[in-house]
């Protein structure tokens, strides 16, 4: 969605995607924080950018630009990291059924969870459980928490 909106704006001759301030103004920072809270509270829902923007009182394009400027990542990427963090926490706590876990944290399927896990952490959930001890899982969770905190 974000890429499509950006491309439409570029084709229409409007501001390019890279024309964003380095840090959001206080009002915009509140909007970004509201979007983060909205995503976190509805982690299992696959809401579109328009739904999130409507909730925080913004246009999808403005939210997309400000979110990336403030956090350094897309709304979609941020939501994926939140979901991976939730899945990782559940795995550390002993969750065995990856299909059920995937659905609980908002992934479309077990393979979607696995692919996203691999792209964010470099390993699959099964590999983490099999090859690494609980300490390594906790370390991966700290990595994700630090990544999310840096985006704050």
Image: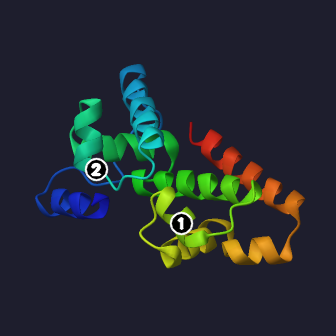
From this view, report whether residue 133 is shown above or below residue 77.
below
Residue plotted at (81% across, 77% down): 130
Q: Is residue 127 left or right of residue 50?
A: right
Residue 42 showing in the rendered view: yes
Q: Between residue 11 and residue 88, name the one nearer to us.
A: 88
- The location of residue 77, given as percent across then percent down, is 47, 57
Circle count: 2
Q: Nearer the viewer, mark 1 or mark 2?
A: 1
Q: Is residue 62 left or right of residue 42?
A: left
For marks 1 and 2, the one nearer the N-term is 2
Residue plotted at (22% across, 37% down): 54
Mark 1 to mark 2 CA distance (whole Å): 25 Å
Residue, disc 2: 49
- Secondary element under disc 2, as helix, strand or loop, is helix
Identify the residue at the far top of this view: 26
- The location of residue 56, given as percent across then percent down, is 29, 31
Tell me if mark 2 has few (under 14), some (14-19) or many (20+) residues whose alpha carbon lies within 10 angstroms of its own: many
Dot 1 and dot 2 residues touching (CB under 8 Å)? no
Res. 46 image quadrant: bottom left
Residue plotted at (37% across, 52% down): 45
Res. 95 image quadrant: bottom right
Tell me if mark 1 has few (under 14), some (14-19) or many (20+) residues whose alpha carbon lies within 10 angstroms of its own: few
Residue, disc 1: 100
Q: Between residue 71 and residue 14, name the one nearer to us.
A: 71
Residue 123 showing in the rendered view: no
- The location of residue 19, given as percent across then percent down, is 33, 47
Residue plotted at (71% across, 76% down): 126
Q: Between residue 22 and residue 95, name the one nearer to us.
A: 95
Image disc number at residue 35: none
- The location of residue 124, given as percent across then percent down, is 67, 75
Res. 108 image quadrant: bottom left
Identify the residue at the far left of this view: 12
């Amino acid at each position: 969605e974000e890429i499509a909106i950006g491309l439409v704006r570029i084709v229409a001759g409007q501001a390019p995607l890279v024309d964003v301030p380095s840090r959001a103004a206080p009002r915009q920072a509140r909007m970004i924080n509201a979007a983060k809270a909205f995503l976190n509270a509805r982690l299992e829902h696959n809401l579109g950018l328009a739904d999130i923007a409507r909730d925080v009182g913004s246009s999808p394009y403005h939210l997309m630009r400000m979110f990336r400027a403030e956090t350094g990542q897309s709304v979609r990427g941020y939501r994926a990291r939140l979901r991976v963090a939730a899945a990782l926490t559940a795995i550390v706590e002993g969750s065995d059924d990856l299909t059920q876990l995937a659905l609980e944290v908002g992934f479309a399927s077990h393979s979607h969870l696995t692919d996203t896990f691999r792209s964010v952490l470099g390993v699959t959930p099964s590999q983490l459980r099999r090859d690494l001890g609980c300490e390594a899982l906790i370390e991966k969770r700290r990595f994700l928490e630090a990544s999310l905190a840096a985006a704050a």
